Image (spheres, rainbow, N blue to C red):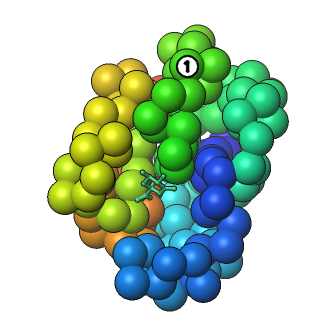
Amino acid sequence: SHVLLLNGPNLGTLGTRQPEIYGTTTPAMIEADVAEEISARGWRLVAEQRNGEGELIDLLQRHGDAVGALVNPGALMIAGWGLRDALADFAPPWIEVHLSNVWARESFRHTSVTAPLAAGVVMGMGALGYRIAARALTRLVPPADE
Ligand code: DQA
């Protein structure tokens, strides 16, 4: 059984990207945190980052057999309608993660087109948010669905 960690555009440069907003934690550190949390259920992590919406959609279609997913859509939260459609057809439970508190930022970030489809949203907790979301997933998925 595996969990999909899907990071959208501009999240591959975490660690050095606008550190005053997104912190200095790297994708590798985040992946290690998430892998540790989900190992409590014996799940394996598949971590992917893509800048393109189409590639993210491909990954969702390919991982329909995941036990669950953590998704940071990046700026696709704002108008990623294709990604939204793919998430609507993605059966496993998934949690949306934003490092920053998007409600405390520019108004164009105040609505996420994907969040209404998520089981939950974690935002404003920085990189720790991924770990928190991973922990939530371990509680969310019933044992039978493994
Ligand atoms: C983000 C918030 C988005 O609005 C922004 O476009 C990002 C990162 C976050 O994790 O805080 O790329 O998803």
Against 17, residue 131 (above or below) is above
- Left or right: 13, with 132 as reference point: right
Question: Compared with residue 22, is residue 109 higher up or lower down, i.e. above or below?
Answer: above
Choose between 106 and 32: the one closer to the eye. 106
Q: Nearer the viewer, residue 19 or 86?
A: 19
Where residue 33 sits: x, y (%)? 51, 74
Q: Residue at x 39, y 84 (%)?
A: 20
Q: Percent position (x, y) of residue 58?
A: 80, 28
Q: Give coordinates of residue 88: x percent, y percent.
A: 51, 14
Residue extending farthest left: 104
Q: Dot 1 surroundings within 10 Å: few (below 14), some, or many (20 or more)?
A: some
Q: Which quadrant of the frame does ligand 1 lie within?
A: bottom left
**Rendering quarter of residue 45:** bottom right
Classify residue 127 as left or right of residue 32.
left
Residue at numbered disc 1: 81
- Which secondary structure, mark 1? helix
Q: Provide residue 36's location: percent of width, then percent of height.
A: 53, 72
- Residue sitting at 63 percent across and 19 percent down? 82
Identify which residue, 87 or 92, lies in the foreground. Answer: 87
Q: Amino acid at mark 1?
A: Trp
